[in-house]
Amino acid sequence: MNNKRTYAGIPEQYAKLETAKVVLIPVPYDGTSTWQKGADKGPEAFLNASENMELYDIETDNEVYKEGIYLAEAVTENDSPEKMVEAVHSEVKKYINKNKFVTIFGGEHSISIGTIRAFDECFNNLTVLHIDAHADLRKEYEGSSCNHACAVYEANQNTNLVQVGIRSMDISETRVMSKDNVFFAHDMAVNEYWMDDVIDQLTGNVFITFDLDALDPSIMPSTGTPEPGGLFYYETLEFLKKVFTERNVVGFDIVELCPNPQEKSSDFLAAKLYYKMLSYKFSSEMEDEEDYSDSTNSPFNQLSKFKDNDEYE
Ligand SMILES: [Mn+2]
């Protein structure tokens, strides 16, 4: 008997690398967080909650795990922030080059630096949709450019960075921020069209980096730096569904779950959010396939620059 753990305890036939469309990479890293420690425990709490979740999604009428979800070996490099970023970068790129839909669960937000670098190298015209309470635009923090406070500095230089839910930042970050691409929480609260306004700023290929502290602390208390005034559950889902429907989402990460043993609902929210995002991805793909039924090309990762050129094989 093979006792290898699978995502959400799904049957092994849906958890094989060769046939899975989705790869999930856990990155239990918490090397640079400044306030509450514990994001390194995030992947384990997320996986535990996922194992206790029902796998039929009512809204999309789908069991997305049947697309296949491979639970990759966790990236545990933590000698330095720079080495961690490089380890994540090469692991993510390895699976993109196998034409998988790559997802990553952190860990603190600095894990996204290597992830975004890999996606930017593999997809043309990339938007990084950054959903977060914090701007994370510092070039360097506490002596490192691989600090969680610098999570999207590089993405801001190299990609079309669109920031949503921001409600805490340093004045120095206003100098590098591109105002048209930033949606502050206080503006979103009074703009009923904010979702469409965000969509308008997205290019064709979108990578989503979702910091759980974007959510309101009343529904997501278990995060390192909770900030009042965040997103609620159904508006978040409505927004994500729009993004998945109207753009080609090429991958995503979810970061900054900082589990509290007394408060399991945050772990469960993170588990449901991950599964919802997959459900939206693959149900919008089913609609695409209907639209282009004559096309022999799958819309899946069709814009990967590395499709036939797998340097890691
Ligand atoms: Mn944050």
Image (cartoon, rainbow, N blue to C red):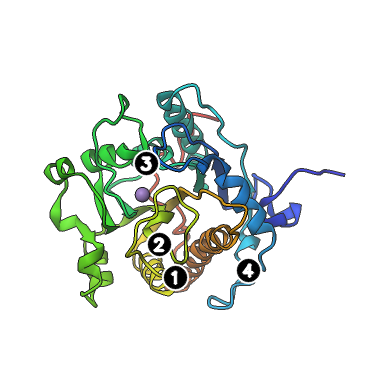
The kind of residue on which mark 3 rests is Ile
Q: Mark 3 points at which residue?
A: 116
User: Left of 235 or right of it: where is 100?
Assistant: right
Of residues 124 and 191, the one nearer the viewer is: 191
CA gap between label 3 and label 2 equals: 21 Å
Q: Mark 1 points at which residue?
A: 233
Label 3 or label 2, whichever comes before in sequence order: 3
Residue 113 visible to the viewer: yes
Q: Residue 50 location, x and y as percent?
A: 64, 58
Q: Tell me, yes or no, whether the two marked residues, 3 and 1, touch with CB atoms within 8 Å.
A: no
CA gap between label 3 and label 4 equals: 28 Å
Tell me the mark number nearer the camera, choosing from 2 and 4: 2
Q: Name the residue under label 2.
A: 215
SS assignment at label 3:
helix
SS assignment at label 2:
loop
Q: Residue at x 71, y 57 (%)?
A: 10
Q: Which quadrant: the C terminus?
A: top right
Q: Name the residue under label 4.
A: 63
Label 2 or label 4, whichever comes before in sequence order: 4
The quadrant holding residue 216 is bottom left
CA gap between label 2 and label 4 equals: 26 Å
Q: Residue 12 location, x and y as percent?
A: 75, 52
The answer to whether residue 278 is above or below residue 259 is: below
Q: Tell me, yes or no, whether the two marked residues, 2 and 1, touch with CB atoms within 8 Å.
A: yes
Q: Tell me, yes or no, whether the two marked residues, 4 and 1, touch with CB atoms within 8 Å.
A: no
The answer to whether residue 131 is above or below residue 109 is: below
Q: Which quadrant: the N terminus?
A: top right
CA gap between label 2 and label 1 equals: 8 Å
Q: Which residue is drawn at 20% across and 67% down?
A: 187
The quadrant holding residue 132 is bottom left
